[in-house]
Image: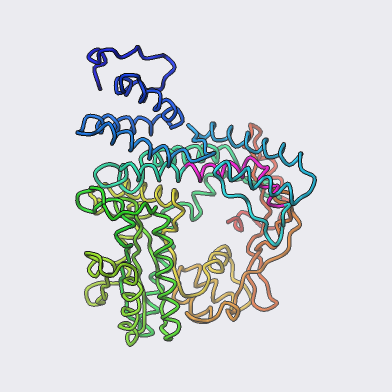
Amino acid sequence: MINQSEAWGTPPVPDYVTGAEKRLWPLSGICGSERKWRRDILPRIPDRFAGQLADLYEKDWWRPGGRLGANTRLRKAARELCPPGVVLSEDADDLQRIAKLKAGNARWLISQQKTEDARYRCLCGYAEESGIVPAEPSSKTGLDGAIRRMCDDRWWRRRLKWAETRAIESAAIEIGLVHKKREIYVSTENLLRRREQLRRNRNLMETLQVVNELGEAFNLQEVIDGSLSNPVLRRNELMARLAGYELYGKQHGYEALFLTLTCPSRFHARYGKSGDPNPQYDGSRPSDGQIYLNKVWSRARAAMARQGIDMFGIRIAEPHHDGTPHWHILAFVRSDQADALITIMRRYALQDSPDEPGAQLRRFKVDKIDPAKGSAIGYVAKYISKNVDGFGIEADESGLEAPKAAERVKAWSSAWGIRQFQLFGGPPVSVWRELRRLRDEVANPDIEAARQAADQADWEVFIEVMGGMYCPRKDRPITLAKAWSDRLNSYGEPVGEVVFGVQVGDVAIQTRIHIWRVEPIDSISRETVFFENLAAQTSNHLEFCQ
């Protein structure tokens, strides 16, 4: 911290300035030009982030030629953090206030328009001025549905949250906060915001309960903890399905390959070893890197399909230290097609900037997994664990404790909307999950065989029962059973088709027995209602509650 008493001629610090401004108050030209300029920027930035910017500004200021560098860095941060129309919130309550204000303005704007088309165009302009992507009309709801959404504070809250999260993350990358020497994978600002949001969500869920038509009530947070939102259960399902893939591959003559796909140098803001700025960096964000990797993957898969190459497995997206994504792919392929797959993947991975330094070495890597040395699942297990909850790992490759690293990786995934895991090939997991709701034997032999496989978490048998690995979806023997519902959603629109079970041909089995509603937990006990309803039934309906 600077000793202000040594800064001769510096005016007193006003009471109304922010903490970051106070820290930087002595740093200015003779006429106070920097103080006035910073006054237009720092108050619009959340306190935690403004404090980090002040720290960097102060360090830049005292370097040779640092006045220009300090102002340039702050200007870049302001450009990323405060794009036109975007107002950064301090906390969830502030975000809610801004969202309600925006929705109220939207409702007033449409009241001034005479036609539906004019109302929609007016709201699109308002959304864009606010730094938000407008709602697009769908084939089901049309312009009216898009207008309803842009007049709803919940819609604004989601969009504003998404915009400010990415603005914060873009600024953190731009000014050099996100890398192994500072804040690995994701900015600490967004990490803390996500941690606080999860805490608030959990506190809210613990005050709510789900109640069915029998009066049976369960704490909503306990229900969530028993779902795939629980990282332990999520990891277990992934591992069960991958174990099934490996068994299927062994029985059908497949070879396991572990592929790594990375982005060209221009996507990386920082060097991997030193954390220093990469002069080749072109300003791309992690979301741009994910788009690039998706294109490489889709083109390679299309080429494989043209050559008749069969493949299944899992794709894992994870960040480099500076947030740039890279992919690990566990692919099971027929042994006689493995070399062709590798050739295709290498060709598409190196189409972009193939001659840049390190491209041939780092852009695409492949390991052929030797079954004699270990299983394919054991090979990939650590990558799943370190991206879910860090189970069974002491530290990641950066040296960060595994649970802390996993938390930062999930915050990174949430900030950029990057899907961490995607299995490809095989039957839809939605049918598997519905079948796991059934506890009793069913009469239909096809459904019963699949139910037993799902109940025993045997994905390999489930693949066979569902017609094999490559059976087209329309030819799968078991599909989801759906029914039309006229129940209105929060925008006053029918929810449409909803899943109620599984079916084979015209035979449907109901897996969702009850109708549930969410309500606050009040001080009046529901036990009396519950047991009165239980006594009136011939069976205990709790066994059907999933």
In this view, the residue farthest toward the front is 31
Residue 120: x, y in percent? Answer: 70, 49
Going 28% across and 70% down the picture, which residue do you hit? 354
Q: Is residue 456 above or below residue 399?
A: below
Going 44% across and 28% down the picture, which residue do you hit? 40
Residue 270: x, y in percent? Answer: 27, 51
Instruction: Indicate whether residue 319 is drawn in magenta.
Output: no
Q: Is residue 534 visible?
A: no
Give the number of callouts: 0
Q: Is residue 463 above or below residue 115?
A: below
Task: Give the image quarter of residue 361.
Answer: bottom left
Question: Which residues fall within the magenta stretch?
Answer: 145-164
286 relative position to 367: left or right: right
Residue 360: x, y in percent? Answer: 24, 70
Q: Main secondary structure of the magenta part?
A: helix
Comparing 312 with 114, the one in front is 114
Q: Is residue 71 above or below residue 264?
A: above
Instruction: Indicate whether residue 163 is drawn in magenta.
Output: yes
Image quarter where the C terminus lies is bottom right
258 relative position to 422: left or right: left
Q: How is the image coloured?
A: rainbow
